[in-house]
Every structure is written in structure tokens, then in C-alpha cells.
Image (tube, rainbow, N blue to C red):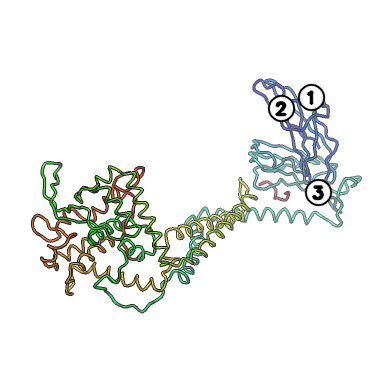
Amino acid sequence: MEEAITVAFGGGFGFTYGFREIPYRRGERVSDVVVLENGEPLRPGASTELEPGGPPGTFGVDDLGGRIRVVWRFNAINEARTFTIRYGLTGLAVAYDDVVDVNLKVWGDEWEQRLGALTATMTGPGGVVRAWGHPVWVRGDVALAGPQARLRALDVPADQFVELRTLYPRNAFRSTGAMRVEEGDGLAEIVEEEQADAADYERDRERIDEWIAHPLRALLALAALVLLPALAIVAFVFWFFGRERRTGYDREWEQEPPGDTEPALVPILLRQGGQPGSFEFTATLFDLIRRGHYKATPATTERKIWGGLRTEQVADLEIAAGEEIELNTFERDVADVVDAVLDGGTERLSRFRDEIEDERTSMARRFEAFKSSVGDEVDRRRWFRSLGAVPLTAAVILFFLVGGVLIALAQDGWRSVYPRYSDVVLAAIGGSLLVGALLLGVTLFLGRRLWRRRAPAAQVEAERWEAFRRYLTDFPRLDEAPPATLALWERYLVYGIAFGIADRVLQGAQIHMPEEIHEASTIYWISPGGDLGSGASSMSIGDLASGFGSALAPPSSGSGGGGGGFSGGGGGGGGGGGGGFG
């Protein structure tokens, strides 16, 4: 075998090196390697390390297992050099009764550089019977000229091998000593093999072109691969682990709070988890006022409107310390915030936001402590069973692993010029499984109602609290008898704040609350115009809770709009063979 490599140097390089790796198959052997520079042989004995240095005019040979590395050393400055490599390759040719098959890899896949043009010529002792270039997806052609087969390949990608397969008549060879001998004729079988490879390539190309021509259909197929398995798993998990069991409770409304569960906990029970936010914080504050830990005195505050051109009087509450009562952990966290605002004196409720913002860093830590304490209390009560998270997590891991393996398999055999259809399918299925893993992961983190259910006792309690929430929502337009006691009216407002529907409770109070009751209340206040509860339309409890949320946000979260990232409560539902060049 003989290979010629020409290299042009456009600058001063000095001592440098070149190398070639000659692949060989099992049963083959490379021998008698000689390197010539411009027709002159180089001396053997050089190092085969791929680094500059060493005496110029030398070469070295090393067997790396499956390939022979040839490295030559030279000195070149602003010139072109041509190097010729000659070697013997035994065991390459296969002798059949009718033909001799010579399938030579003229360019290996170890090259990480693209090759613009490659030419190779094979010469035998007789006229060429048939010849093919491999693989068929590389651009090029093969020409026959008597005993020669000439291959030309263009734009060979990096890591892409090129082969020249040539058949010669068996009777043209005097000896088969350096060949592998196979009994029987080989021409028909080899031609059939090459035709089959070419047909496979054409079939792959047609299938891929069909995908490209109908992208919507391809996308729908991929969407089905993503959604159907993921939805099936989610449906399974929901049915067996997330679906709430029937309790027999059938009341539409509960006209009184069905228990003494603290207002900061009830919304979490109804939405099956999550963190408390500004509405739960505000409800706890009003509950502490209702229970006498703080005193609230009706007051009016002047507020500027119309860009400061006008002022109006707004109903307000003057907050002061009250009696010491027993508080649980998260109520104490709220009290720490309020006590820091009062600082031993009094403060109007409308000023709380500004006071909290003045000490944002310490207040944010107290609010985080409140959220953590509420979470600890929910865990202690064991309201929820999260067994569905186990199969869902297992499915995420399985989808991710299988998808990753399929993509790795596709990448391992990927042809950059024209991919195989099988590799495209493997990559598409693998990518779809990864997207499915992402969807299942999102379900795991955001869709807790699908994989979590309440304990039986907690489910009964939740249904009763949900009925009470519906009652408060519908309360303003009901003909039911209104509450008769101040304590019940005030509990209505506290839980209404926690549910995020305080405006509905205030609307009901405007319609149904007796004047002698609202005059005794510490948490309902009267506007300057004398309308019960209408002060809330001037200083909305919703705005108050939102202001607490933004003021209690950490400094890095910003202080703008709508709660600074805190939740608003709520609590409702929730090798070789290829074809010939074309």
C-alpha cells in the first residue's frame, strides 16, 4: 500500500511532526512501514508521541491495537512537503472461487478534522470486476480504468471513515498466500450485500425526508410519545394515591367555623400543602387582636389622593399591646413582627407596612420563621399522605435514564452527513422520554394534588372547612339568619382574611351585622360616613395583606407589587460495509 500526504506551511514552524494511523481488522497485519519525504526515505526510530520535537528526517511506528500509528519528524518553514507512506497489509484480501474482494479503509474515523478532498487508487493484476465506495452517504464517485479503481470523496466530515472496495478476478492472482480464502463464489453475494446497503440508505433517506416534509405529523407523533406515557403514569398515581376518598359528608354550607384550627393552617389543609403567605400572616394578626393579645381602637387617618392635591379621611385601627395569652410558635413569630412595629407604644394599622419596610432584613427573617413554624405544625398534625411521590419519582428517574441511554446509543452511531433512520428514531424517543421526565418532574413539584391525599380524619375536616368557605363566599346574598354573637362575627372576618375573601365578609357585615355588635368589635371599623365596614373599601384588607407580603420580602426580592413572591392564601380547590457512492 502507498499513501501520499501533501502539507503546505505558510509560516515559520521549525521542527514539527506529522502522523497517520492505519486501521486494521482482526486477521489483518500491517508490516514493512516506510516513510518517504519528497521521494527520500526517512530513518526509523523516532518517538510516536504526538508532540513537536525530535530529530528531523526520522519516523516511528507503534501498534495501538486495531491501528498502527506512524509519526514522522521534519523541519519546514514556509513551504509545501509531500510525504509518502508505504506499508504491507496482509489478510486484507478475501479470495473466493470467482473473485478476490479487497475492502480497504483509505481514510480512518480517528481524524477529528474535516477533509476537503480525498483521492485513492487501487491497482490489481487484472481488470476490475466491480468497485464501490463506502459509505454511500459521503459525497463522491468511483471510476474504473482497467486494473485500477479510482475513488474521489469530497467534504469528508470529521470522524468519518472512507473505504474503497474492489473485486478482481480470482484467476488474475498467482498466489493467495497473503489472503483469507473462502470456499465458493462470492460475486453474487457481495453484489447483493452492496445493493442491500444502498437500499437501506435510500429507505432511511426517504423516511427522514418524509418527516421533514410533514413536520406537523412528526411533532404530533413526538407529542404522543411524550404525553401518553406521562399522562398514563400521572393518571395511575392520581387514581391510587392522590384521589380523595369519599367520607359521606354532603352539606353545602357550614354556618360556623367547624373547629378551632388556627386560621394560618386552614388554607394549607384545603390546598393540600404549600407555604403560608401574607393572607395567613394577616389573619393571624387579626386573630391575636380578636383574642385580646393586642388592643385595637377605631381611628381615622388622613390620606393624600390626586397626587397630593386632595386628602381624605380613612377608617383605621390604632394597635397597642393587650393581655398576655398563650401563643403557639407561629403566632409568636407574628407577635414578634407586631411588637417590633409597636416598640412599646401604639401604631396605626395603615402605618405597619412602612414600619416593617424600615427594618426589612430582620422582619423578613421573622416572616421566614413564621412560614417554617406553620410547616412544622402541619407536619406534626400528619394531615397528608404523600405515597404517590414514590412511584412518580421512580418514573422520573426511569424516563431520564432510558431517554439518556437511547440518546447515547443514537449519538454513538450518528452520521453527521445523513443520519440513519434508526438513529433518528432513537434520538426522538430518547428526547421525548427526557421531556416526559421533565413533565413528570413538574407534576411532582407543582401538582401535589395529583399524588397526595389527606388522611381520613383530615379529609372530613377539610370538607367541613370547604363548606364553611363556601358559606362565607355566598353569605352576603343568603337569607339565612345572621350570626347573633360578636365572637362569631369576628371569627367570620378572621377566617375570611385567611381564605382571601375578607371583602365578602365585610359586604355581609354591611347587610346583616347589628349596629350594637359592630360598635363593640375591635376588628370591624366604621368609616367617617358611618357605614359599617365600608372603611375596608378605603383601606382594603386585601391591600393590607399584599402590603405585608411585599414589606416582609427579603431585600433582594424587591419591594414591589402584590406580595413580594409570598402566596396570597386562598384555600379553594386546587466498520466497513456500505453502499457505492451515488
The residue drawn where x is 85% and y is 54% is: 182
The residue drawn where x is 46% and y is 71% is: 239
Dot 1 crowding, Cα within 10 Å, few <14, some 14–19, many 20+ = some
Spatial CA span between label 3 and label 1: 32 Å
Q: Nearer the viewer, residue 324 or 257?
A: 324
Please give the label number shown on residue 26. 3
Give how far across and how far down residue 198 sits, in percent: 67, 53
Snapshot quadrant of residue 428? bottom right
Q: Nearer the viewer, mark 3 or mark 2?
A: 2
N-term-proximal mark, 3 vs 2:
3
Give how far across and how far down residue 87 sits, in percent: 82, 36
Give how far across and how far down residue 394 sits, in percent: 54, 62
Q: Is residue 574 visible?
A: no
Answer whether labels 3 and 2 touch (C-beta < 8 Å). Answer: no
Dot 2 crowding, Cα within 10 Å, few <14, some 14–19, many 20+ = few
Snapshot quadrant of residue 189? bottom right
Q: Is residue 15 visible?
A: yes
Spatial CA span between label 3 and label 2: 32 Å
Please give the label number shown on residue 57. 1
The residue under label 2 is which amino acid type? Pro
